Image: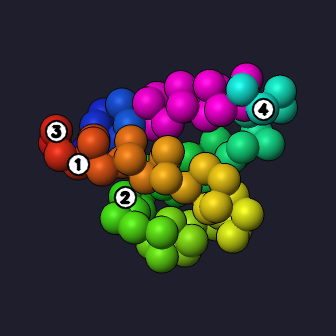
Amino acid sequence: SASASEGLFEELRVLRRAIAAENGVPPYVVFSDKTLAAICDAMPDDEDDFLEIPGVGAAKLERYGEAFLSVVREWKRRA
């Protein structure tokens, strides 16, 4: 549902902000809002799924994939 994925989107934004702050870069350098929305739509299960998402390349998968995947997995577990 829209509200459910909105909640996930917010969690992903919080994670993105934390990663960005840690790396001293603006949040959009980690992932754009568009990519976060695509993650919410795709609900990736693993790295292969994550790599299919527009805006995710090998470097970003390597750097941030596990953190974002674990938020999605946790979200699905609670759903």
Q: CA distance from mark 3 to mark 2?
A: 13 Å
**At label 2, which amino acid type do we have?**
Met
Question: Helix, strand, or loop for circle 2?
Answer: loop
**Quadrant location of the C terminus?**
top left
Looking at the rendered structure, the kind of residue marked 3 is Arg
Q: Which residue is mark 3?
A: 78
* Residue picked out by circle 2: 43
Give 54 or 62, whichever is nearer the viewer.
62
Q: Nearer the viewer, mark 3 or mark 4?
A: 4
How far is mark 1 from mark 2, CA to CA? 8 Å
3 or 4: tag closer to the N-terminus:
4
Q: Which residue shows up at 64% across the image and 26% down it?
A: 17
Q: Tell us which disc is closer to us: 4 or 1.
A: 4
Q: Which mark is residue 23?
A: 4
Can you give x and y, in whole percent of width and height, for residue 45 in the image? 34, 64
Q: Quadrant of residue 42?
A: bottom left
- Marks 2 and 4, how far apart in space? 25 Å
* Element marked by disc 3: helix
The span picked out in magenta is 9-21
